[in-house]
Amino acid sequence: MDPLLEFIAWGYLAAIVWFLWGPWQDHCIDVARQNLFAARDDLFDLASGDGGISFSDNAYVELREYTNSLIRFSHKMTWVWMAALFGAAPAPRPNPVSSHISSIEDPETRKAVERIWLRVSETTVKLIVSRSPLLALLIGLVLVVHRVSSFIQKSPFTGLRMQVFGVIETETTNAARVEPVLHAQSAHKLNQAA
């Protein structure tokens, strides 16, 4: 390889690595924090209006504290950090946010708080995945394979394909049964000719 082209290739690789572990990380953290601030703001609006939840409600307090901790520690949230955190944690315990949300009596308020909880959870997962280019690539490949396989299963040609494979399988099975008989007949004819 030409040394100049090799130098340029290494330069591009270094630039990609710098971007993915530099500005891209900061961008992902900023976007996640902005989404978490918006979710916390929606929770505040729900409690400050006539949303059926008060500032002293356990669901409000737990979800606000959880969201605040995610905002505070979002710069540390990677899949390695989460794996170490869950690996070092004692036995899993029920999530207090979920249990407090399920105790909200008004169904409309409960749905509104669940939507905020879902936004916070989705933001956390997106942050962890987007901060790891390899994990994002792996999940992207899994999603593509899943989409393709579900498309194939829903395809109108699936039934036809299964019929064709069924015919091929039947013919192969029949050929496997007939082949030993043909070998025996050929061997018998060769013995007679000899």
Image (cartoon, rainbow, N blue to C red):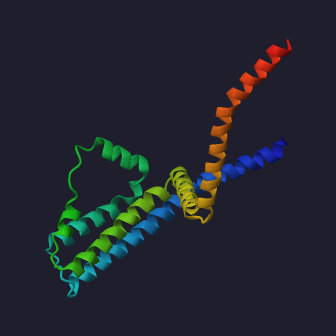
Q: Residue at x 66, y 40 (%)?
A: 172
Residue 91, given in percent of the width and then of the height, sits at 22, 44
Residue 140, given in percent of the width and then of the height, sits at 55, 57
Give the residue at the far bottom of this rendering: 50
Give the residue at the far top of this rendering: 194
Residue 189, given in percent of the width and then of the height, sits at 80, 20
Above or below, 138 against 124 in this view is: above
Q: Quadrant of the N terminus?
A: top right
Above or below, 136 against 184 in this view is: below
Above or below, 12 against 171 in this view is: below
Is residue 191 or residue 176 the one in the foreground?
Answer: 191
Write down the quadrant of residue 112 in the picture: bottom left
* Apparent side of residue 80 relative to residue 92 in the rendered image (left or right): right
Write down the quadrant of residue 99 in the picture: bottom left
Q: Quadrant of the C terminus?
A: top right
Q: Residue at x 42, y 50 (%)?
A: 79
